[in-house]
Image (cartoon, coloured by chain):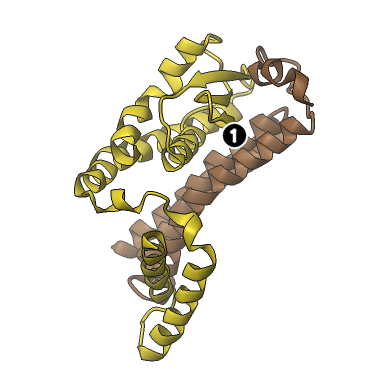
Chain colours: A brown, B yellow
Amino acid sequence: MIDIIGLIFISVGFTFDVFGCLGLVRLPDVYNRLQAATKCVTLGTCSILFGTFLVVGFNAAGIKALLCMVFLILTSPVAAHAIARGAHRAQVKLWEGSIVDRYKEDKEGEF
Amino acid sequence: MRSRIVLFLIALLLWSLLSWMPDWQHLLVGVFVALLVAFLTGDLFAQRAHILRRLSRYKYFFIHYLPVFLKECFKANLDVAWRVLHPALPINPGIVKVKTHLKSDTALTFLANSITLTPGTLSVDIDKDNGILYVHWIDVKDKDIEGATRIVVERFEKLLKKIFD
């Protein structure tokens, strides 16, 4: 029974990871792509890890999977934040359909 | 000093979880590694170690913050999946400014991470002195600083203030 629940979690995780990759291809600029990459890939991968934990149970591999979930949730937004900030500082343009860029307005003099 | 002890305990716990099941050999090596880590980076870890002792903060974190966070995270995934699968690609992106009243580094880190993992928003930069966050929003509903603050930040700000400030 618990194996089946674990496999369901793993399949849901795969589905969300695929959506994240589709987002990477379809969305127009680096910031929008980061949105798809961080959100879908974080929850998708966490779901896969949690499914793994359910399947293998409370042993060495299961505990490592749980630890990986915690660190993934902590680090993936930080990485996205760093990439977005770095891209903006390197003057990567927003997509031409973007409607507002307050960051550029405020940081005009600093570059 | 206190921050080093906290870091030492956390590093030791992490080590014993990573080398499950812990026996005395693993634990002995773990003590040395944790001591080294605590010695090298201890002063960076918890500047205000005294707040770790307030139990009500843990209650707020696990009972009030975590369910809200997981719910928003799941909604964010469905939202992105919907946008990606929609043939017309319904996005309306932009970078907006939001205000925050949080002061401590930990609270700001958690706020920025929460914003990144919730529907449609991604924190780009923090201006800590003025309490301003720059947030990339995939579907801008309000260009105004007050309106954007109300939609993006307020879900988390009160809880995080109770937990970390």
- Horizontal arrangement in the rendering, residue A51 relative to residue B93 (left or right): left
Name of the residue lying farthest toward the front? B1
Q: Position of residue B40 (x, y in %)?
A: 54, 67
Which residue is labeled 1 in the image?
A35
Q: Position of residue A49 (x, y in %)?
A: 45, 59
Q: Position of residue A13 (x, y in %)?
A: 48, 50
User: Disc 1 residue type?
Assistant: Gln
Q: Is residue B89 above or below residue A52?
A: above
Q: Quadrant of residue A28?
A: top right
Foreground pick, B49 / A44: B49
Q: Position of residue B141 (x, y in %)?
A: 52, 12
Could you tell me if residue A13 is visible in this image?
no
Q: Quadrant of residue A18?
A: top right
Q: Quadrant of residue B159?
A: top left
Q: Chain of mark 1?
A: A
- Horizontal arrangement in the rendering, residue A64 relative to residue B67 (left or right): right
Report the quarter where the N terminus of chain A lies. Answer: bottom left
